[in-house]
Amino acid sequence: MTKLEKHYNLEGVEEKWYAEWLEKGYFSPDPSGNEAYSIVIPPPNVTGSLHMGHALNSTLQDILIRWKRMLGFEALWIPGTDHAGIATQNVVERQLAKEGLDRHKLGRDAFIERVWKWKAEYGGRIIHQLKSLGASCDWSRERFTMDEGLSRAVREVFVRLYEEGLIYRDKRLINWCPRCHTALSDLEVEHEEIEGILTYIRYPFTPPSPPLSKGGIEGGYVVVATTRPETMLGDTAVAVNPGDERYKDVIGKTIDLPLTNRRIPVIADSAVDPSFGTGAVKVTPSHDFNDEAMARRQNPPLPFITVIGDDGKMTPEAGAQYSGMDRYVCRKRVMEDLNSRGLVEKEEKHQHSVGHCYRCKTIIEPLSTLQWYVNTKPLAAAATAAVRCGKIRIVPSSWENTYFAWMENIRDWCISRQIWWGHRIPVWYCSDCGEINVSRETPKTCKKCGSGKLRQDDDVLDTWFSSALWPFSTLGWPDETDDLKTFYPTSVLVTAFDILFFWVARMIMMGLKFMGEVPFRDVYIHALVRDAGGEKMSKSRGNVVDPLILINKYGTDAFRFTLAAFAAQGRDIRFAEERVEGYRFFVNKLWNAARFITMNTGAVPAEELEGMFRDKEPLLIAHHSSLDLSSRWILSRLAATVEEVNAALGEYRFNDAANGIYQFIWHEFCDWYIEMSKHAIYNKSECSAGTIACLITVLDHSLRLLHPFMPFVTEEIWQTIRKYLPESPESIVISRYPEKLPRDIRTEEEVSYIMEAVTGIRNIRGELNISPAAEVTVLIKTFKARAGDILKNNLPLIQRLAKAGEITVGRELEKPKGSATGVRDSFELYIPVEGLLNIGEEIGRLMKEKMKVAESLSFLSKKLLSDDFLKRAPKEVVEKEKARHQELVLKDERLEGSINRLKEMGVKNG
RNA sequence: GGGCGAUUAGCUCAGUGGGAGAGCGCUCCCUUCACACGGGAGAGGUCGCUGGUUCAAUCCCAGCAUCGCCUACCA
């Protein structure tokens, strides 16, 4: 037997077992084996480093996978990373900048080579970190979104969507990041509320000025308001609401646009809100989404004048004096020029939201460009239906509404990005005839004219395009692999809500479209991990808690258990480090329980102990009648816990599962059963093999229950007791998860009497501060014959646990003079306290208690006198409350008596 | 602007239509041979505010306040 140290020492344990598990291949399921259970990991960015979000996400998945594996499923957890187009390109570009290079100097091919090199060097970091979390992923199936197989899937999907007309190319306004120099989808724009300036500018009418209407127009000009004055250089109209009386006479008139030599019309459009600003709006179709829509609605459509370029600088069309200027420098200059002409009416502070690039936080610029789009409406309809009809269950279900709302308002998805790192769009343009060739394989000649002069589209696809295929591309699609047949659809997707739209919704659309089946049955949406103050953790806030540091400090097991215990549904997690410390104590508690048990296996002859385990599981059931009361009790409590934990995990209530195990191991197994068992163990003549076998059995089951949460310490301990267990496999990883053990309610009830007696005695001792050395005499007056019998049969146990001396049990006992009283459900305890305590203090305590009772009593009396309550409350409730009232009356009388007796004693003793 | 969520012990959080729980912290007692990373006993809460429904509300409903998040084309 390995000798266990007093404190659990994690040094080397985790690495040792993880290596062992990998070597044995426990994490690789057999596609032709039992029923499948599968999860695909939300692939972390290849540039990523493990943060709390990953840690929580991965821990929950690992708990599910380990649980199902132990239940006998072929459990597959596919790991991998995402190529993270813009993010990765940014990282490598920063690296280049340090060397005084940029990607344009390097050229496209060399740059991409450089990114691959970077990936080879640093891209495995997060994978390594996942392993240190104990993640039981099947690493032999690890994928990367730019793997050859996944690239094939991407092309297949693109071509088929194009052929069905669901992918198209169009020139329209998109969100443009001037820093990343690429288009972004709507989702990739983060809106932030900022305080800007609303500038009111005078636009003079082309002379002769029109006659003035009421308000609005003064001295031959109309006033418009804007937060972006520089865009006026691209204005092609001023719009007013057609119903706006103030402006009805000027619709159709023209304006001499200041700082330019252009003339623009005043138009009518019902989208204009007459109550905002002046009720007149400058229209810049090339740089504002609203204005673009307005321009297209006009007949004929308004012209588009692009004054800001893709680098965020003003174009020649902005005018010679502004061309080449940065957009914000230009804003200043325009303001100066307007001011010098007296055209600025006023400036106001103004709260409005501004879009920022989600990768680099640069303010995005709406820009009219040619991009590829997915027509998402038809795909979204099926994806909505799948959730509505229950083919996919979103847990917690409160997220369903969010999902529906987004899906029903979905807009077409801009999928092209003007960067280099990613899946290049499989489109080739013919230089001779202009034909667009869309193809799975790189074509040599134009399909229309046969020309060999083909040029591939420069753009790459949005990173999320390949992510959307992840649940089936990782399983081998478009090939019909065994893995695909066995493991698709996957069982559950575990993720945070922040990528519900980016990723989850798109996976559902693509899965339904290309597999004809949902990609997963359940979507479990877990909380976001925030800091203790509720702030989102981020590098810029400097409040990031590094999971790896916690793992180092407290061990992976304690850390994982903390995450699970925190993972209540529907609420964000405020992470508190003290909790991790608390659960490390729990690891140590478990460790010492195991130490106690392994130290005492020799209390009975080895053959006898072996005999207990000779039968197959459930070994102890066979011996049930030979087991003592407390052993039968702990087995029943174990059964209750097993039931609770399985039920909780089945509903993704990780916190309930974790707390259930914690409660059982610490407070029932350790605090009660082990203490009860000592009586037998330290008196070898009384010790039965059953008790030792029961200790081992409960420990074994506890370890297996706990293993998905705490994989390492459970394996470490389990290996030391494995030799006692019949037909046990070589690792706890592949052992059977406890399920469906028999309960014994009668025994549980009986033991509850003993526990009540013990806590009752301890109560009195503790409250009266009676020395632990004093063996108190106890009288127990029972109300029920059965309770009395149980207590009588277990007196030595009660004496031991409560450090009591003589105990008398009976139905007709009289309370001795000068004794403290404890009231329980089934009996009353009397402990003569004369000489054991300070009478003054005790009287004070009793008075305090009496006041509390009196308060409850007055409340209850009022309630019981109320006609309404008596008439309308359910009978059983009324009965309950009456009984409670009776009890309180009795308790009050007893307290009164005790106080009086103590007072007498006090007088006697001076 | 629309929507969602939160508000429970000093702290971090569970929970329920019939006078509220855990962990940590705090107080007191105990170095008893698994564990002081331990054991035992306690103190501590008008369950955000105001109304309503109900015999009964911390829980259901409405409004308000504070905080957080999502979403949106008010220039």
Image: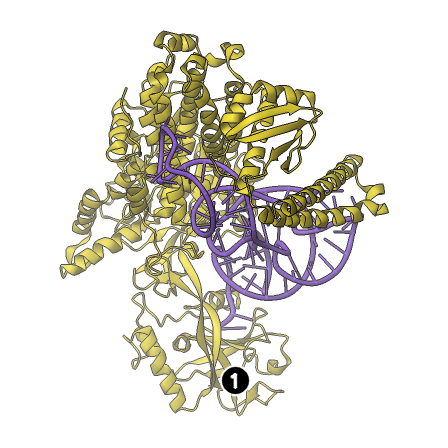
Q: Is residue A747 left or right of residue A627?
A: right
Colour of the chain lettered A = yellow
Name which quarter of the figure residue A704 lies in: top left
Secondary structure under the numbered disc 1 in the rendered image: strand
Q: Is residue A584 above or below residue A286?
A: above
Q: From this view, report whether residue A649 is shown above or below residue A96.
A: above
A815 sits to left or right of A758: right
User: Is residue A149 positioned above or below A786 on the image?
Assistant: below
Q: Residues within 10 Å of mark 1 (few under 14, many from 20)?
A: many
Camera-side residue: B33 or A746?
B33
Left or right: A444 as drawn, with respect to B47: left
Tell me the kind of residue under disc 1. Answer: Val
x and y percentages locating residue A595 in the rendered image: 34, 26
Chain B shade = purple
Q: Residue shown at 68%/47% (left/top)?
A: A850
Q: Position of residue A13 (x, y in %)?
A: 26, 32
**Res A196 visible:** yes
Along the line of sight, which residue is nearer the eye, A704 or A51?
Answer: A704
- Judging by the rendered image, the residue that carries numbered circle 1 is A222
- The x, y position of residue A598, in whole percent, is 34, 21
Q: Residue at x 43, y 35 (%)?
A: A514
Question: Is A313 or A195 nearer to us in this picture?
Answer: A195
Tell me the residue at 40%/15% (across/down).
A684
Q: Nearer the viewer, residue A2 or A292?
A: A2
> Can the viewer see residue A386 in this picture?
no
